[in-house]
Each structure stands twice: as structure tokens, then as C-alpha cells.
Amino acid sequence: MKQLSFLCLLSCSSLIAQDFHKWNANVGGGVSFPLGDASDRVNTGYNFTTGAGLNLSKHFGIEADYIFNGFNLSDKALQGAGAPNGYAHMWGFTANPVFRFEGSGKLGGYVLGGYGVFTRTVNLTRPGVVPGVICDPWTFICYTGPVYADVIYRSNSTTKGGWDIGGGVTYRLGESSAKFFAEIRYYDVLSSDVKKSPNTDCAGVAAAVHRRSHTGC
């Protein structure tokens, strides 16, 4: 599975040049665009990301990230599977060394790359009736009864290792310790048998909050 992701991040950093923040954490989400093998199998989807890291110095650190991407299957994929509906998602964890550098004025940047483990799941669904709870918003009375919903009748998952590489630019907001991050990242997760399980490519745009807790040098 390959993925190209764009991430916009809001970050907190030290106002004291000779200090750096020891720990950091982030959370965010946005839009994912399928590419390559995935472009005719899934539609544009969404992504969610969160992570944390250790800054070993002002310029170098290590981060661990979790990423989740969700997609609806394309009409072509549904027709090939003979299914009325379906969806897919990919999630995984990565460990990434990060190198940060300073630019002019309020601008800065960073590059990162590493390795991770990813799971891809495809679910085929069809309309069905399942037991559920129905609540009247006016009387606040709830009762059990049949509910119409999409029911998963076929599912398949694969888990493989993969690598990622990327980089981004930062812009400090005003005189505060907050920064805006714009990032591009590439994920490559290959199947052990590309004839049976083709690669997946996608691109994503996300917004996130990135916060670093303060410690001295």
C-alpha cells in the first residue's frame, strides 16, 4: 500500500532560543485521495492521525505516529465484487526520526522518515435488518425493534510492514509559541505477493494540533 499525505499542523514551541521542548504530541484529520492501484478501487476518503515524540535536541528527534484512512469502494470495485456497497480502511503505526531546521524570520521546516506496520481491511456490505434501540426525541421513550442498516457480509484484512518519508514547512503565529505546519508524506506498504494483492496509493490533506511540553536543554 502506498500513500501520499499532506498534513497541516498547529504546534507549540519554545520562545527561548537556547531551550527546546523535550516531548511532543499531535492529533488531526483531513481528506485522503487514492492514487495508482487504489485510484480505481476506492473513492476520495478521510484520514485521522495522532502521535507523540521525544526531541533529543533542538534539531533532531524521534516520533511515533498512528494514522487511519477510510474510503468507500468505487463503483468499478463494487461491480467486480458483485456487491451493492462496501468500504475500506488502512491504519498503522510508524516510528520516524525527525530533523528540524530554521529558516528566515518565522519560517522553518523539517524532514522525517521511518518504518511502520499497516493493516488494510476491505468490507463488503448490503442492506439488512438488525435489532436496535429506537428513541423518540419528544417523549424520550426508547424501545427495541428492527433497524435497517448496511450489514457486513464479507471482509478481508492484510497486515504488512512499510516505510514512510516526508517533510514540511512551519510558520510561527504572531509572537506566541504556536506554529502552523504544512506537511507532505509518502507511505509505501507492499504486499508479499503483488499479483494477488496490488499496492495501494493515495494522497491526503489533514489538519492537526501538535503540542510540545516544555523542558530545558
Image: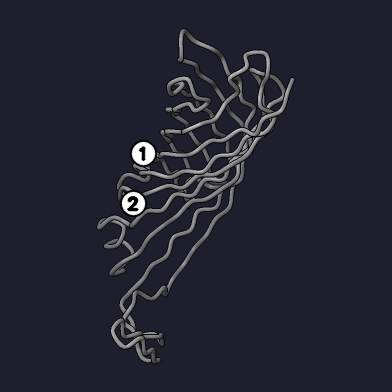
Quarter of the image where one finds residue 60: top right
* Labels 1, 2: front one: 2
Please give the residue where the numbered disc 2 appears in the rendered image.
42
Judge whether 149 appears above or below 146 on screen: above
Type of amino acid under label 2: Val
Left or right relative to 182: residue 39: left
- Which class describes the residues within 10 Å of circle 1: few (<14), some (14-19), or many (20+)? some
Depth check: give the residue in front, 52 or 121: 52
Judge whether 89 appears above or below 2 on screen: below
Depth check: give the residue in front, 73 or 53: 53
Q: How many marks?
A: 2
Residue sitting at 50 percent across and 44 percent down?
A: 49
Type of amino acid under label 1: Gly
Residue, far top: 104
Judge whether 131 appears above or below 195 on screen: below
The disc at residue 21 is none
Residue 78: image x %, image y %? 30, 62
Asked if one can make out residue 169 in the rendered structure from this viewpoint, the answer is no
Depth check: give the residue in front, 199 or 96: 96
Residue 52: image x %, image y %? 63, 39
Residue sitting at 42 percent across and 65 percent down?
A: 123
Q: CA distance from mark 1 to mark 2?
A: 11 Å
Residue 73: image x %, image y %? 33, 57
Please give the residue where the numbered disc 1 appears in the rendered image.
36
Residue sitting at 42 percent across and 47 percent down?
A: 47
Left or right relative to 16: residue 136: left
Say whether disc 1 or disc 2 marks the residue closer to the N-terminus.
1
- Indicate the quadrant containing the C terminus: top left, top right, bottom left or bottom right: top right
Residue, far right: 217
Asked if one can make out residue 209 in the rendered structure from this viewpoint, the answer is yes
